[in-house]
Image: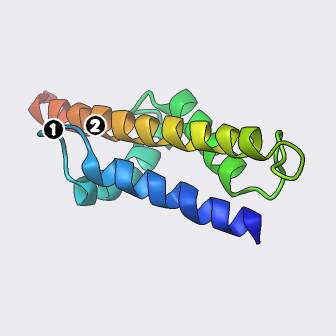
Amino acid sequence: MAKTLKRAAAFSALTKALVSGARGGPSLSKRVAAIPRMLKATASGKYDGGMRLALMTAATVYVVSPIDFVPEAFLFVLGLADDAVMVAWLAGAVLAETERFLEWERQQDRIVVV
């Protein structure tokens, strides 16, 4: 039960961070729509986000996983803090990477292959 509440709070924090975004940055809908394209471009080798996407995937798995490096049952505050730090990093990473990818896409539109 506690892990479920923690996950809900973590995803709520991530959603708030994504919605707030950078001033003048892409909207949440543009960022979410860019994620499948970013994954496809990375998988095909066109976009260089492989390591960053792998780290974001690992962070997501850690947050949603029932296994915890610092369990809340033993160290309540520290157990929640490690997840909060992970969610904060993940939110920042998603914001930065989607913005970087959208800029990369804009640059690709300017390149004319002859």
Relative depth, front residue between 19 and 45:
19
Q: Is residue 108 above or below residue 79?
A: above
Assign a secondary structure to mark 2.
Answer: helix
Place of residue 88 in the rendered image (x, y in percent of width and height, measured from the top left): 50, 39
Give left or right: position of 47 versus 81.
left
Give left or right: position of 11 versus 92.
right
Relative depth, front residue between 106 and 77:
77
Place of residue 39 in the rendered image (x, y in percent of width and height, measured from the top left): 46, 47
Q: Is residue 93 above or below residue 26?
A: above
Give left or right: position of 69 versus 36.
right
Q: Which one is earlier in the sequence, the residue at label 1 or at label 2? A: 1
Residue type pointed to by label 2: Glu
**Quarter assignment of residue 10:** bottom right
- Report the quarter where the N terminus lies: bottom right
Residue type pointed to by label 1: Arg
Q: Is residue 104 among what the camera can see?
A: yes
Assign a secondary structure to mark 1.
Answer: loop
For image coordinates 45% across by 43% down, the residue present is 91
Q: Is residue 34 among what the camera can see?
A: no
Which mark's residue is nearer the viewer, 1 or 2?
Answer: 1
Circle 1 residue: 23
For image coordinates 27% across by 56% down, the residue present is 28
Q: Residues within 10 Å of mark 1 (few under 14, many from 20)?
A: few
Circle 2 residue: 99
Q: Which mark is residue 111?
A: none
Relative depth, front residue between 47 and 66:
66
For image coordinates 16% across by 36% down, the residue present is 106
Coloring basis for residues: rainbow
Label 1, label 2: how far apart the Cα atoms are: 12 Å
